[in-house]
């Protein structure tokens, strides 16, 4: 399993549109084959900065999503509101503590 964290920074006027877009597509993203978990976070001090946090079966599953029709539908609408280049990290999960 891999963990994917993406930092997204939006123009202030694009925040509502992004939140609506995420609300509309979150179930389809989470239901995409290979996606095991999905969360969206909003920065406490900068309400135009968001992070997506997702678990993927493996790198191949993430790449299938990134080349899918669903991603090609969502990504252009998402990046239209950016005020900075997105940052992304793909990580191996080592430990979970309860």
Image (tube, rainbow, N blue to C red):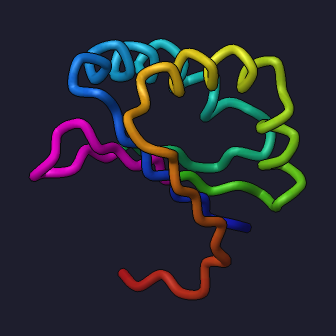
Residue situated furthest left in the rendering: 45
Rendering coords of residue 17 (x, y %): 35, 13
Rendering coords of residue 7 (x, y %): 44, 51
Residue 67 as seen in the image, left or right of residue 29: right
Residue 53 as seen in the image, left or right of residue 47: right
Q: Is residue 81 magenta?
A: no
Q: Is residue 46 magenta?
A: yes
Tell me the residue at 45%/23% (across/down).
22
Residue 82 as seen in the image, left or right of residue 71: left
Tell me the residue at 41%/85% (across/down).
97
Residue 4 as seen in the image, left or right of residue 86: right
In which quadrant of the rendered image does the C terminus lie?
A: bottom left
Q: Closest to the observer: 9 or 74?
A: 9
Vertically, is 54 above or below 17?
Answer: below
Q: Closest to the observer: 49 or 3?
A: 49
Q: Quadrant of residue 67?
A: top right
Tell me the residue at 78%/49% (across/down).
62
Tell me the residue at 42%/43% (across/down).
84
Q: Quadrant of residue 75?
A: top right
Vertically, is 5 above or below 46?
Answer: below
Rendering coords of residue 96 (x, y %): 48, 81
In which quadrant of the rendered image does the N terminus lie?
A: bottom right
Stretch of the chain drawn in magenta: 41-53
């Amino acid at each position: 399993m891999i963990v994917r964290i993406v930092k997204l920074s939006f123009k202030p006027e694009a925040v509502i549109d992004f939140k609506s877009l995420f609300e509309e597509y979150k179930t389809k993203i989470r239901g995409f084959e290979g996606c095991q978990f999905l969360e969206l976070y909003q920065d406490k001090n900068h309400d135009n900065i968001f992070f997506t946090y997702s678990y993927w079966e493996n790198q191949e599953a993430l790449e299938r999503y990134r080349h899918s029709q669903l991603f090609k539908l969502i990504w252009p609408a998402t990046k239209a509101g950016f005020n900075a280049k997105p940052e992304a990290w793909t990580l191996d999960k080592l430990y979970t503590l309860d």
